[in-house]
Each structure stands twice: as structure tokens, then as C-alpha cells.
Image: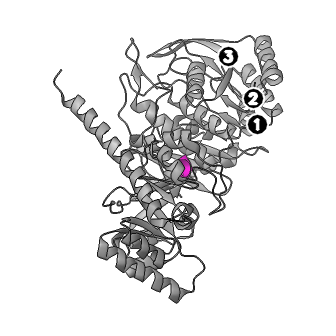
């Protein structure tokens, strides 16, 4: 029997089940992660706030933490409501003794008011912060930590605040970042600011209306738990923060209402494209969308030269990518021009890999870029592509890369590598079918999706069944002994999957439209 990595929640008990330990454990279960908990306090609370708080006796808390260290060896720790100064000091000592990611949801008070949830000396709070990998205050908590007036507007304070929080509070040996959450601000978008040692990022989602009785209860727990869950699995900060915001937005959008009338975060909510976060390097920028595709990509061969493009067009392929590498500038331009002219004549969707200027000059249908290509673009390049009429396809692998892509509003997203591939060295592990299905569901119906990496004709049907609109292949076509037969087989696989999906959609629509 394999041993599962355990995430540890150190937080209080909320009898409503809308926050605290119950929410942390439900969120981790939804992520497929094993979870354990240490209770710091019992509370009496409802929609009007926290009425009473009884900290766990210190010897019991100390013993529970020691048991967790000995028996569970947690892969990550999430801190929530700590209850009192003695408990906070005990938890700080525990976090200092474990060498794993620690996420501190700085719960200093309840959003609905009532009994303060943590009264501790600044030295204890600072000790907690320095033992943490990431802290996740909201605007109210950030104001208290910084000793400034609460900020309510839409302007400049958040970036300055998040930098100040990191400089003043996070100077420990394992410190990585602070996230200043946007739920208590105003405006059409809710913006979370992520500040690392050397960069500042903004993650934006559409702001949702308040639930019954005010703000949705438990969102801070959902966010910090999701962040800890991702860090425990080896995710980087951008990936973890994007995943946390995606899940939190879904938890708010699908919130449930308690019998007492309070809106509760749905910790196990499945995110979809309505919850899509947009990742920006600095201040959020609203962009116009790139032009859409004319049709689902289906079979999507990636080929090395224009001769292959022409050959596949003759065989009826209507979406193809030219990935020409190592050519001199003049030869590259000639290859792209030849392929683009032939594709236009047949009404095909030709994407050029990487070389967007040559694609634009030749009048190609679109360009496909990887994440590393995005980082090399200069200011204005994307707008030049969009206004020049290019469609844009972007490679993605995880929630962070998807969030960066979503900020650019491309024509399609590619997900992969699905399986190991020898065509290109990939820094990440393959996505696999289970994760491919989950990511596909998250992106629909906003984006057409293409699977990339390690897809053979034998594997293509399984990939398409995960919700893809097309699958990119390299050796399955250019390495086939009978190219025409391989094209026919690939087109049949794509056609069958897309037709089946359309029948399902029509059936669902008919069911929804049918009289009761």
C-alpha cells in the first residue's frame, strides 16, 4: 500500500461547516489530497459573527501538534484561525520545526464581526509570518498588519501594500511570497496581488455579487487551502495562486445558503471557464480578443516545411501548423509564404510556430506560441498580431500558464504534453488523461482546445474523449509509412469525437427545452 502525502490544517472549528477545518478538509478532498487537522479552538458563530471562542487547552494543542509531526509528517501546512496568543506561539514553534510549505491565512477577525479571532503581540504575529512560505491577508487584515487605514477603492494602494507587507513581515529563511486578496475591494474585477522576492503579479477574475447576508463565508479558507495543496504537490507560486483563485471564484459562484440565510463557500465546487483567472505581470490590462477559429481543428498535423503543408492540403487537411526550425531568414520567409498562399487558396487554417512576423507578412491564418515565446515578446507585439488579423494559439500545461494565456484572450488553447514526447524537451511532467479532462472542462465553453505532446493515432481517441476540439500530431503523420492512410484515420477519429459531442449537446439542449 502506497503512503499518501498528508496536508495538515491547523485551524478552528466552525459549527456551521462554512469555514475552518471543515472547509479545509473538504477542499483538499476535492483536490484528491489526503488531509489531517489540529483544532486550535471551538467557536459559536452564525451569520451575525463569532459569538464565543474557546481555545484548545495548551497541553492538548501541543500534544496534537507533536502527534502530527511524528505520525503524519505533513507535506504542507495551512494555518487558519489560531484563537489566542498562547496557541499562536505554539503553532509558530511547530511551523519553525517543519521543513515544508506553510500557508498562513491571517485570520485576525470574522468578516461578520463579533469576538476577535486572534489577539497576539506583534512579535508573535511576526514570528508566524517568518515561519510561513506564503501569507494570504485580505485588505482588512493587511491594513491591520501595516497599521494603516483600511483601503476601499480601486486605485494604487494594493501594489504598494503588497510590497510593504513582504518587506515588513516576510523576512524568514523560507519566505517566498505574500498574496493580497481582492475580495474586500471594489470594481468590476477582483484582483489578487502576488508579490515574490523579485516580481509582482496580478490575478484578476470578474467580481461576483455578495451573497445573502453579505460576503460569502469561508472564501479565505478555500483560497489558502488550495494554495497549500498546490505547493504540497510541487507547484510554483504562479501555478498555485492561479489554482487557488480559480477554485475560490468557483466556490463563491456556486455558494450554498445555510438555513440561517448565510452564503457559504462551496469548497468542492468544480471550476469552469466562468471562473477563469487572468494573470498579468503587474497592473491588469484589458485586451481585445483575438479572432476566433473558423472550425474545430480536428486532426492538427505539425510539420517541418512547406512541402509537407502542401502535401497535407492535397489530402484534405484543413488545419496544419508549420514548425520550421534552423532555417536562414530568407529561406524561412519563403517557406512561410509558400505555405500561407497554398492554405489561403484552400480555405485552410495555417498556423506558424513561433515566427509571428513572417506569418503576418505572409498573410498566414495564425501563429502558435509557447510560454517561453510569450516572455520574449516586446510591448505592442501582441497588439500588432491581433490588429494584423492573426489568430493566436498558446501552449499551456497548468493553471498558471492558462491564466497567463487567458489574459491575452487567444483563439485557442493547447494543453500538454499529454504523454511523454521526444519532439521537444518538456520541463514538466506529462498532463495525463485525468488532468487533461479536468482542464478541458475548466476551459469550456470559452476556448477551443487542442491536445499536444505524445499523441499517436492509437491514443488520439482517448485524448479527444477528454473534451478536446483537436489533437496535434507530429510523427503520427510525418513518420507514417502511408501518409494518406494516416490522414484518413486521424480525420475519422476527430470527426467521430466531434460529431458525438455535438449529438450530446443537441440532446442536452433538447432536454432543457422540452416541456416539463
Q: Residues within 10 Å of mark 2 (few under 14, many from 20)?
A: many
Dot 3 falls on a residue whose secondary structure is: strand
Q: Which circle's residue, 3 or 1, is located before the other in the chain?
A: 3
Q: Which circle's residue, 2 or 3, is located before the other in the chain?
A: 3
Let me know if residue 106 is in the magenta part: no
Span of residues in magenta = 397-401
Callout 1–callout 2 Cβ contact below 8 Å: yes
In this rendering, would 432 be left or right of 350?
right
Which label belongs to residue 74?
2
Residue for badge 1: 100
Which label belongs to residue 39?
3
Q: Is residue 132 visible?
A: yes
Q: CA distance from mark 3 to mark 1?
A: 20 Å
Dominant secondary-structure state across the stretch colored magenta? helix
Q: Position of residue 250 (x, y in %)?
A: 44, 34
The chosen color scheme is one colour
Let me know if residue 398 is in the magenta part: yes
Check the image and name the residue furthest to the left: 515
Q: Position of residue 81 (x, y in %)?
A: 62, 23
Residue that appears at 53% across and 49% down: 458
Amino acid at each position: 500500500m502506497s503512503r499518501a502525502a498528508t496536508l495538515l490544517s491547523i485551524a478552528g472549528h466552525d459549527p456551521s461547516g462554512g469555514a475552518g477545518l471543515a472547509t479545509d478538509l473538504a477542499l483538499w478532498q476535492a483536490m484528491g489530497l489526503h488531509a489531517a487537522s489540529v483544532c486550535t479552538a471551538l467557536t459559536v458563530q452564525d451569520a451575525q459573527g463569532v459569538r464565543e471562542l474557546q481555545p484548545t487547552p495548551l497541553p492538548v494543542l501541543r500534544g496534537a501538534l507533536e502527534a502530527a509531526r511524528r505520525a503524519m509528517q505533513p507535506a504542507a501546512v495551512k494555518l487558519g484561525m489560531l484563537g489566542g496568543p498562547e496557541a499562536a506561539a505554539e503553532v509558530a514553534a511547530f511551523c519553525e520545526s517543519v521543513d515544508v510549505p506553510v500557508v498562513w491565512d491571517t485570520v485576525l477577525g470574522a468578516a461578520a464581526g463579533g469576538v476577535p479571532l486572534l489577539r497576539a503581540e506583534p512579535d508573535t504575529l511576526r514570528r508566524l509570518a517568518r515561519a510561513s512560505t506564503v501569507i494570504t491577508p485580505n485588505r482588512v487584515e493587511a491594513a491591520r498588519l501595516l497599521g494603516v487605514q483600511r483601503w476601499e477603492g480601486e486605485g494604487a494602494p494594493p501594489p504598494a501594500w503588497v510590497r510593504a507587507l513582504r518587506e515588513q513581515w516576510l523576512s524568514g529563511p523560507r519566505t517566498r511570497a505574500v498574496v493580497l486578496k481582492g475580495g474586500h475591494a471594489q470594481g468590476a474585477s477582483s484582483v489578487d496581488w502576488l508579490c515574490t522576492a523579485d516580481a509582482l503579479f496580478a490575478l484578476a477574475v470578474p467580481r461576483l455579487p455578495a451573497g445573502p447576508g453579505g460576503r460569502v463565508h469561508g472564501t479565505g479558507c478555500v483560497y489558502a487551502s488550495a494554495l497549500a495543496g498546490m505547493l504540497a504537490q510541487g507547484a510554483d507560486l504562479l501555478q498555485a495562486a492561479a489554482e487557488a483563485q480559480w477554485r475560490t471564484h468557483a466556490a463563491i459562484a456556486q455558494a450554498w445558503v445555510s438555513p440561517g440565510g448565510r452564503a457559504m463557500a462551496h469548497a468542492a465546487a468544480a471550476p469552469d471557464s466562468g471562473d477563469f483567472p487572468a494573470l498579468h505581470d503587474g497592473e491588469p490590462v484589458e485586451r481585445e480578443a483575438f479572432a476566433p477559429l473558423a472550425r474545430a481543428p480536428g486532426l492538427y498535423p505539425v510539420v517541418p516545411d512547406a512541402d509537407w503543408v502542401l502535401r497535407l492540403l492535397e489530402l484534405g487537411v484543413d488545419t496544419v501548423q508549420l514548425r520550421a526550425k534552423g532555417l536562414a531568414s530568407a529561406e524561412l520567409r519563403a517557406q512561410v509564404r509558400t505555405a500561407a498562399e497554398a492554405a489561403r487558396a484552400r480555405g485552410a487554417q495555417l498556423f506558424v510556430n513561433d515566427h509571428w512576423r513572417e506569418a503576418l507578412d505572409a498573410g498566414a491564418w495564425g501563429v502558435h506560441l509557447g510560454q517561453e515565446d510569450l516572455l520574449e515578446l516586446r510591448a505592442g507585439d501582441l497588439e500588432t498580431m491581433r490588429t494584423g488579423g492573426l489568430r493566436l494559439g498558446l501552449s499551456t500545461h497548468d493553471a498558471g500558464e492558462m491564466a497567463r494565456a487567458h489574459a491575452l484572450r487567444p483563439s485557442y488553447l493547447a494543453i500538454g504534453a499529454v504523454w511523454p514526447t521526444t519532439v521537444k524537451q518538456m520541463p514538466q511532467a506529462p498532463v495525463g488523461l485525468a488532468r487533461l479532462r479536468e482542464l478541458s472542462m475548466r476551459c469550456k465553453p470559452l476556448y477551443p482546445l487542442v491536445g499536444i505532446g505524445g499523441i499517436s493515432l492509437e491514443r488520439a481517441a482517448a485524448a479527444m474523449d477528454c473534451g478536446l476540439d483537436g489533437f496535434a500530431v507530429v510523427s503520427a503523420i510525418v513518420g507514417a509509412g502511408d501518409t494518406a492512410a494516416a490522414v484518413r484515420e486521424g480525420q475519422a477519429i476527430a470527426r467521430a469525437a466531434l460529431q458525438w459531442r455535438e449529438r450530446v449537446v443537441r440532446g442536452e439542449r433538447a432536454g432543457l427545452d422540452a416541456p416539463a
